[in-house]
Image (spheres, rainbow, N blue to C red):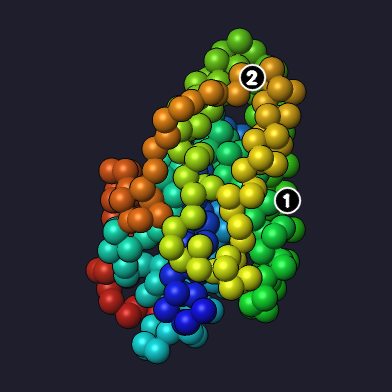
Protein backbone atom coordinates (compact mmCIF):
# COMPACT_ATOMS: atom_id res chain seq x y z
CA UNK A 1 0.00 0.00 0.00
CA UNK A 2 1.58 3.29 -1.06
CA UNK A 3 1.95 6.19 1.36
CA UNK A 4 -0.73 8.33 -0.28
CA UNK A 5 -3.38 5.64 0.14
CA UNK A 6 -2.26 4.97 3.70
CA UNK A 7 -2.57 8.67 4.57
CA UNK A 8 -6.08 8.66 3.09
CA UNK A 9 -6.94 5.69 5.30
CA UNK A 10 -5.51 7.32 8.42
CA UNK A 11 -7.54 10.47 7.74
CA UNK A 12 -10.70 8.38 7.34
CA UNK A 13 -10.08 6.85 10.77
CA UNK A 14 -8.92 9.99 12.54
CA UNK A 15 -11.54 12.42 11.24
CA UNK A 16 -14.31 10.58 13.08
CA UNK A 17 -12.55 11.08 16.42
CA UNK A 18 -11.54 14.63 15.55
CA UNK A 19 -15.05 15.84 14.77
CA UNK A 20 -16.70 13.92 17.60
CA UNK A 21 -14.02 15.24 19.96
CA UNK A 22 -14.87 18.77 18.90
CA UNK A 23 -18.57 18.14 19.48
CA UNK A 24 -17.94 16.76 22.96
CA UNK A 25 -15.58 19.64 23.70
CA UNK A 26 -18.41 22.07 23.02
CA UNK A 27 -20.10 20.71 26.14
CA UNK A 28 -17.36 21.88 28.50
CA UNK A 29 -19.14 23.93 31.16
CA UNK A 30 -22.55 22.93 29.81
CA UNK A 31 -23.04 19.43 31.21
CA UNK A 32 -26.24 18.69 33.15
CA UNK A 33 -24.16 17.87 36.25
CA UNK A 34 -20.54 18.50 37.19
CA UNK A 35 -19.69 14.80 36.99
CA UNK A 36 -21.17 14.41 33.50
CA UNK A 37 -19.59 17.69 32.38
CA UNK A 38 -16.15 16.39 33.37
CA UNK A 39 -16.83 12.99 31.80
CA UNK A 40 -17.77 14.54 28.44
CA UNK A 41 -14.68 16.76 28.55
CA UNK A 42 -12.47 13.75 29.28
CA UNK A 43 -14.00 11.82 26.39
CA UNK A 44 -13.20 14.79 24.15
CA UNK A 45 -9.60 14.82 25.37
CA UNK A 46 -9.27 11.07 24.82
CA UNK A 47 -10.47 11.43 21.24
CA UNK A 48 -8.14 14.34 20.51
CA UNK A 49 -5.23 12.35 21.94
CA UNK A 50 -6.01 9.53 19.53
CA UNK A 51 -6.31 11.98 16.65
CA UNK A 52 -2.91 13.45 17.42
CA UNK A 53 -1.29 10.02 17.26
CA UNK A 54 -2.95 9.30 13.91
CA UNK A 55 -2.10 12.68 12.40
CA UNK A 56 1.50 12.62 13.62
CA UNK A 57 1.89 9.35 11.78
CA UNK A 58 0.19 10.72 8.64
CA UNK A 59 2.42 13.82 8.72
CA UNK A 60 5.47 11.60 9.07
CA UNK A 61 4.42 9.61 5.99
CA UNK A 62 3.84 12.75 3.93
CA UNK A 63 6.58 14.16 1.74
CA UNK A 64 5.39 17.65 2.61
CA UNK A 65 6.44 19.90 5.47
CA UNK A 66 3.24 19.49 7.46
CA UNK A 67 2.33 18.74 11.06
CA UNK A 68 -0.64 17.20 12.83
CA UNK A 69 -1.99 20.75 13.28
CA UNK A 70 -2.11 21.29 9.51
CA UNK A 71 -4.10 18.10 9.01
CA UNK A 72 -6.50 18.92 11.81
CA UNK A 73 -7.12 22.61 11.18
CA UNK A 74 -6.15 23.63 7.66
CA UNK A 75 -8.07 21.33 5.33
CA UNK A 76 -11.19 22.39 3.46
CA UNK A 77 -14.57 20.92 4.38
CA UNK A 78 -14.66 18.47 1.46
CA UNK A 79 -11.30 17.02 2.57
CA UNK A 80 -12.72 15.71 5.86
CA UNK A 81 -13.80 12.07 5.65
CA UNK A 82 -15.74 11.63 8.89
CA UNK A 83 -19.10 9.89 8.85
CA UNK A 84 -22.17 12.11 9.07
CA UNK A 85 -23.11 10.70 12.48
CA UNK A 86 -20.32 12.38 14.42
CA UNK A 87 -20.94 15.87 13.04
CA UNK A 88 -24.56 16.01 14.19
CA UNK A 89 -25.10 18.89 16.66
CA UNK A 90 -25.63 18.79 20.42
CA UNK A 91 -29.38 19.41 20.27
CA UNK A 92 -29.89 18.24 23.85
CA UNK A 93 -28.34 15.76 26.26
CA UNK A 94 -30.29 12.86 24.74
CA UNK A 95 -28.77 13.55 21.31
CA UNK A 96 -25.29 13.80 22.85
CA UNK A 97 -25.67 10.39 24.49
CA UNK A 98 -27.35 8.70 21.52
CA UNK A 99 -24.68 9.95 19.09
CA UNK A 100 -21.90 8.86 21.43
CA UNK A 101 -23.51 5.48 22.04
CA UNK A 102 -24.03 4.69 18.35
CA UNK A 103 -20.44 5.61 17.52
CA UNK A 104 -18.80 4.06 20.60
CA UNK A 105 -20.03 0.56 19.86
CA UNK A 106 -18.65 0.80 16.33
CA UNK A 107 -15.41 2.42 17.50
CA UNK A 108 -14.74 -0.31 20.05
CA UNK A 109 -15.22 -3.12 17.51
CA UNK A 110 -13.10 -1.25 14.97
CA UNK A 111 -10.17 -0.80 17.36
CA UNK A 112 -10.48 -4.39 18.53
CA UNK A 113 -9.71 -5.52 14.99
CA UNK A 114 -7.24 -2.73 14.15
CA UNK A 115 -4.98 -4.13 16.86
CA UNK A 116 -4.23 -6.94 14.38
CA UNK A 117 -3.09 -4.56 11.64
CA UNK A 118 0.16 -5.42 9.89
CA UNK A 119 1.02 -1.73 10.23
CA UNK A 120 2.77 -1.66 13.60
CA UNK A 121 2.02 2.01 14.26
CA UNK A 122 -1.71 1.66 13.66
CA UNK A 123 -1.81 -1.50 15.75
CA UNK A 124 -0.05 0.31 18.61
CA UNK A 125 -2.46 3.27 18.47
CA UNK A 126 -5.40 0.85 18.53
CA UNK A 127 -4.04 -1.04 21.54
CA UNK A 128 -3.67 2.20 23.47
CA UNK A 129 -6.96 3.73 22.35
CA UNK A 130 -9.23 0.75 22.99
CA UNK A 131 -8.78 1.12 26.75
CA UNK A 132 -10.22 4.63 26.54
CA UNK A 133 -12.99 3.69 24.12
CA UNK A 134 -14.01 0.82 26.39
CA UNK A 135 -14.83 3.45 29.01
CA UNK A 136 -16.62 5.63 26.45
CA UNK A 137 -18.81 2.69 25.46
CA UNK A 138 -19.66 1.88 29.07
CA UNK A 139 -20.45 5.53 29.84
CA UNK A 140 -22.80 6.05 26.89
CA UNK A 141 -24.47 2.63 27.28
CA UNK A 142 -25.14 3.24 30.97
CA UNK A 143 -26.77 6.56 30.13
CA UNK A 144 -28.89 5.00 27.38
CA UNK A 145 -30.25 2.55 29.96
CA UNK A 146 -30.66 5.25 32.59
CA UNK A 147 -32.61 7.54 30.29
CA UNK A 148 -34.61 4.81 28.55
CA UNK A 149 -35.64 3.12 31.77
CA UNK A 150 -36.14 6.40 33.61
CA UNK A 151 -39.02 8.84 33.49
CA UNK A 152 -41.60 9.05 30.73
CA UNK A 153 -39.98 12.27 29.50
CA UNK A 154 -36.41 10.91 29.51
CA UNK A 155 -37.53 7.78 27.64
CA UNK A 156 -39.33 9.84 25.01
CA UNK A 157 -36.32 12.11 24.47
CA UNK A 158 -33.72 9.34 24.16
CA UNK A 159 -35.98 7.32 21.87
CA UNK A 160 -36.42 10.36 19.63
CA UNK A 161 -32.66 10.91 19.54
CA UNK A 162 -31.94 7.28 18.67
CA UNK A 163 -34.64 7.31 15.98
CA UNK A 164 -33.25 10.50 14.40
CA UNK A 165 -29.59 9.44 14.49
CA UNK A 166 -30.09 5.85 13.34
CA UNK A 167 -30.24 7.01 9.72
CA UNK A 168 -26.51 7.80 9.89
CA UNK A 169 -25.34 4.41 11.19
CA UNK A 170 -25.19 2.45 7.93
CA UNK A 171 -22.34 4.63 6.64
CA UNK A 172 -20.11 3.23 9.40
CA UNK A 173 -20.04 -0.09 7.54
CA UNK A 174 -19.67 1.14 3.97
CA UNK A 175 -15.95 1.35 3.09
CA UNK A 176 -14.52 4.06 0.89
CA UNK A 177 -11.69 3.32 -1.54
CA UNK A 178 -8.97 3.89 1.05
CA UNK A 179 -10.64 1.51 3.50
CA UNK A 180 -10.99 -1.16 0.81
CA UNK A 181 -7.32 -0.84 -0.14
CA UNK A 182 -6.17 -0.97 3.48
CA UNK A 183 -8.27 -4.05 4.19
CA UNK A 184 -6.87 -5.85 1.14
CA UNK A 185 -3.32 -5.19 2.36
CA UNK A 186 -4.18 -6.44 5.88
CA UNK A 187 -3.51 -2.97 7.24
CA UNK A 188 -7.10 -1.89 7.76
CA UNK A 189 -10.26 -3.43 9.16
CA UNK A 190 -12.99 -5.22 7.23
CA UNK A 191 -15.71 -2.90 8.53
CA UNK A 192 -18.48 -4.69 6.62
CA UNK A 193 -17.95 -7.73 8.83
CA UNK A 194 -18.51 -5.66 11.98
CA UNK A 195 -22.13 -4.79 11.30
CA UNK A 196 -23.80 -7.97 12.56
CA UNK A 197 -22.01 -7.87 15.92
CA UNK A 198 -22.59 -4.11 16.17
CA UNK A 199 -26.33 -4.49 15.60
CA UNK A 200 -26.52 -7.28 18.15
CA UNK A 201 -24.57 -5.35 20.82
CA UNK A 202 -26.52 -2.15 20.31
CA UNK A 203 -29.78 -4.08 20.32
CA UNK A 204 -29.02 -5.66 23.70
CA UNK A 205 -28.47 -2.26 25.31
CA UNK A 206 -31.59 -0.77 23.73
CA UNK A 207 -33.63 -3.74 24.92
CA UNK A 208 -32.34 -3.32 28.47
CA UNK A 209 -33.22 0.37 28.22
CA UNK A 210 -36.77 -0.59 27.14
CA UNK A 211 -36.20 1.28 23.88
CA UNK A 212 -37.17 0.27 20.34
CA UNK A 213 -34.44 -0.34 17.80
CA UNK A 214 -35.29 1.61 14.62
CA UNK A 215 -36.01 -0.33 11.43
CA UNK A 216 -35.05 1.79 8.45
CA UNK A 217 -34.63 1.00 4.78
CA UNK A 218 -33.05 4.29 3.74
CA UNK A 219 -29.93 5.84 5.27
CA UNK A 220 -27.97 9.06 4.94
CA UNK A 221 -24.37 8.81 3.71
CA UNK A 222 -21.68 10.85 1.99
CA UNK A 223 -19.31 11.96 4.74
CA UNK A 224 -16.57 9.51 3.75
CA UNK A 225 -16.61 11.08 0.28
CA UNK A 226 -16.43 14.59 1.68
CA UNK A 227 -20.14 15.35 1.20
CA UNK A 228 -21.30 16.62 4.57
CA UNK A 229 -24.33 18.11 6.27
CA UNK A 230 -24.48 21.86 6.86
CA UNK A 231 -23.45 21.27 10.47
CA UNK A 232 -19.81 20.50 9.64
CA UNK A 233 -19.20 23.91 8.11
CA UNK A 234 -20.25 25.69 11.28
CA UNK A 235 -18.18 23.29 13.40
CA UNK A 236 -15.07 23.90 11.29
CA UNK A 237 -15.50 27.67 11.45
CA UNK A 238 -15.13 27.42 15.21
CA UNK A 239 -12.47 24.73 15.26
CA UNK A 240 -10.24 26.34 12.62
CA UNK A 241 -10.65 29.97 13.65
CA UNK A 242 -7.44 30.36 15.65
CA UNK A 243 -5.16 28.65 13.13
CA UNK A 244 -6.59 30.57 10.18
CA UNK A 245 -6.61 33.93 11.96
CA UNK A 246 -3.09 33.57 13.33
CA UNK A 247 -1.21 31.30 10.87
CA UNK A 248 1.70 29.30 12.31
CA UNK A 249 0.97 30.52 15.81
CA UNK A 250 2.73 28.50 18.53
CA UNK A 251 1.97 28.34 22.23
Residue depicted at x 47% and y 82%? 2
Image coordinates of residue 227 in percent, x first then y, are: 31, 51
Which quadrant would residue 219 be assigned to in this image?
top left
Q: Nearer the viewer, residue 125 or 46?
A: 125
Distance in Å between CA atoms under marks 1 and 2: 22 Å
Q: Nearer the viewer, residue 42 or 107?
A: 107
Eyeballing the image, is 209 above or below 199? above
* Residue 204 horizontal/vertical position (percent): 73, 29
Q: Which mark is residue 211?
A: 2
* Front-most of residues 179 and 138: 179
Q: Position of residue 109 (x, y in %)?
A: 68, 51
Residue under numbered circle 1? 134
Q: Can you say whether 241 is above or below 150 in the image?
A: below
Question: Can residue 107 be seen by looking at this rendering?
Answer: no
In the image, 248 versus 187, the foreground residue is 187
Q: Is residue 81 visible in the rendered structure shown here?
A: yes
The tally of labels here is 2
Residue sitting at x 40%, y 54%: 224
**Mark 2 falls on what kind of element?**
loop
Q: Is residue 239 left or right of residue 5?
A: left
Say which mark, if any, is on residue 99.
none
Q: Which badge, 1 or 2, comes first in the chain's sequence?
A: 1
Identify the residue at image location x=47%, y=62%: 12
**Disc 1 on helix, strand or loop?**
helix
Label 2 Cα neighbours within 10 Å, binned few <14 / some 14-19 / many ≥20: many
In this rendering, would 213 be left or right of 79?
Answer: right
- Quick check: 105 above or below 177? above
Tell me where residue 201 appears, x and y as whole percent: 71, 36
Residue at the limit of the structure toward the top, as seen here: 152
Mark 1, Cα crowd under 10 Å, few <14 / some 14-19 / many 20+, is: some
| Quadrant of the snapshot with the C terminus | bottom left
Amino acid sequence: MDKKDLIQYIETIADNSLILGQRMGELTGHGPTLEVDIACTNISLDLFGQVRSYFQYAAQLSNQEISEDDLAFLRQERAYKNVLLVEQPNRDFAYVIARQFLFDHYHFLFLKHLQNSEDETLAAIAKKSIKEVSYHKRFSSDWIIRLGDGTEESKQKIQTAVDDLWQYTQELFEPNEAEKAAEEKHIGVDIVSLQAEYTQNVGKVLQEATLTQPDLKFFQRGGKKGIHTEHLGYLLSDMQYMQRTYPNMKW
